[in-house]
């Protein structure tokens, strides 16, 4: 047991901090003064193994996972003990899970479900994930010595490593951000225990969990008795593994601003829902570049795309495909620039913008231009190139080694 000081502001100078910690211990942290507490530090041996759940960034119990928006990316495994049809708005390297033009989520990892797209072995693995996540949930809840640093309110606090337990059963991160200070120890651990719910952010303002001085997202755990709601206003950055007795909701429908979770969202008995959310499994270093929102001039969807990059710029998307099938549709006044070194490509221009395609793929390439924009295709692949041009503007269809058709 180590006696430390928890402050509602950034950590004070060392002398002031030591002086403040000479006062008697108290179970709560004031937002106007630095109040010392007797804090239970967490040993690595106290943290349960996640077992089969460890590689999963998102798990939706038996109720599935839902995505809305076109900018959701899951970097890690995703799964549910439910049927594969209970996953909507996603694609992996193998399957498409009921995507629509407005609900496109990329999973950079395996998707583990029951039938029809999951195998019996997949279902067994999903059951093991659920069991191991539940075991970890119960063991996290049983770690002793938790204190409530701010009467259930985490906004504006700077917390040292330790066990924190809400006296009321709920934790709320509102009003300001939460900082977790590793104090120079990259192995420092935080466990937040709550018998009921976790709320991060307010209806009109997202909040962040800020990691400082060696703190790492892999060492932060949120044991949530019921449900977790993360930044319903959209935006914000959350950190840590969330294991919720019910489900996890990140952002809410209609929010275009990207929300980020560096950690895991594991729902034991309910679904995980996301809106334009990036989830980075601890240990992944993926940087996702998202174009600014501009009245949805361009819709991009892809299946089996190994490398799809969206470049910043108003109404502009650059697509680099080194994988399999990719489809792109330009419906506004923007620009699509496609470099296709993968497989099948389907590109459609129905708007007033411009589409440039350079294809070296061995798969079939089909381009349809029915708008007032212009399309330029440079193809050097071995397979057929089919171009359908019924638009009103310029076109440029250079000869290729394939078969070029103009209609």
Image (tube, rainbow, N blue to C red):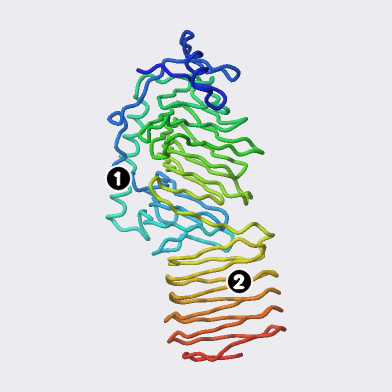
> 259 or 268: which is nearer to us?
259
Q: Quadrant of residue 244?
A: top left
The residue depicted at 70 percent of the width and 70 percent of the height is: 333
Residue at image location 34% in from the left, 24% down from the top: 143
Q: Quadrant of residue 164?
A: top left
**How far apart in space, not on screen, are marks 2 and 1 (Cα)?**
41 Å
Camera-near label (2 vs 1) is 2
Q: Secondary structure at mark 2?
A: strand
Where 58 falls versus 204 (above or below)? below
Picture coordinates of residue 258, whole percent (x, y): 58, 49
Residue 283 placement (x, y as % from top left): 38, 47
Q: Quadrant of the N terminus?
A: top left
From the viewer's perspective, is residue 199 above or below residue 350? above
Q: Secondary structure at mark 1?
A: helix
Residue at the top extreme, as displayed: 24
Image vertical order of residue 248 relative to residue 192, above or below? below
Depth check, front residue: 303 or 42? 42
Q: Sequence-wise, which precedes: disc 2 or disc 1?
A: 1
Question: Which quadrant: the C terminus?
Answer: bottom right
Q: Give the residue at x 54% y 17%.
A: 34
Disc 2: which residue: 336
Residue, disc 1: 52
Circle 1 crowding by C-alpha within 10 Å: few under 14, some 14–19, many from 20 = some
The quarter of the displayed image where residue 269 is located: top left
């Amino acid at each position: 047991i180590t006696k430390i000081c928890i402050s509602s502001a950034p950590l004070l100078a060392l002398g002031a901090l030591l002086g403040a910690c000479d006062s008697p211990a108290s179970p709560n942290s004031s937002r106007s003064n630095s109040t010392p507490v007797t804090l239970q530090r967490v040993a690595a041996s106290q943290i349960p193994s996640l077992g089969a759940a460890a590689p999963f960034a998102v798990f939706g119990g038996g109720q599935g996972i839902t995505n809305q928006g076109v900018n959701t990316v899951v970097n890690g495994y995703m799964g549910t003990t439910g049927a594969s049809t209970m996953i909507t708005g996603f694609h992996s390297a193998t399957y498409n899970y009921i995507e629509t033009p407005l609900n496109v989520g990329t999973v950079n990892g395996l998707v583990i479900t029951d039938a029809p797209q999951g195998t019996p072995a997949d279902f067994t693995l999903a059951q093991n994930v659920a069991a191991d996540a539940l075991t970890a949930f119960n063991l996290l809840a049983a770690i002793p010595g938790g204190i409530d640093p701010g009467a259930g309110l985490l906004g504006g606090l700077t917390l040292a490593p330790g066990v924190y337990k809400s006296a009321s059963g709920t934790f709320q991160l509102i009003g300001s951000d939460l900082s977790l200070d590793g104090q120079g120890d990259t192995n420092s651990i935080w466990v937040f225990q709550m018998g009921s719910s976790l709320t991060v952010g307010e209806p009109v303002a997202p909040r962040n969990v800020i990691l400082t001085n060696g703190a790492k997202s892999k060492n932060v755990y949120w044991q949530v008795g019921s449900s977790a709601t993360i930044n319903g206003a959209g935006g914000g950055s959350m950190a840590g593994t969330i294991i919720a007795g019910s489900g996890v909701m990140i952002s809410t429908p209609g929010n275009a601003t990207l929300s980020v979770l560096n950690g895991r969202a594991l729902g034991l008995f309910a679904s995980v829902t996301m809106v334009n959310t990036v989830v980075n499994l601890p240990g992944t270093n993926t940087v996702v570049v998202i174009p600014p929102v501009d009245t949805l001039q361009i819709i991009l969807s892809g299946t089996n795309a190994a490398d799809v990059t969206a470049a910043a710029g108003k109404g502009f998307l650059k697509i680099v495909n080194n994988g399999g099938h990719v489809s792109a549709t330009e419906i506004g006044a923007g620009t699509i620039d496609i470099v296709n070194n993968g497989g099948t490509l389907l590109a459609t221009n129905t708007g007033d913008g411009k589409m440039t395609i350079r294809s070296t793929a061995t798969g079939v390439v089909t381009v349809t231009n029915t708008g007032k924009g212009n399309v330029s295709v440079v193809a050097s692949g071995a397979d057929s190139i089919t171009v359908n041009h019924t638009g009103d503007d310029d076109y440029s269809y250079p000869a290729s080694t394939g078969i070029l058709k103009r209609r």
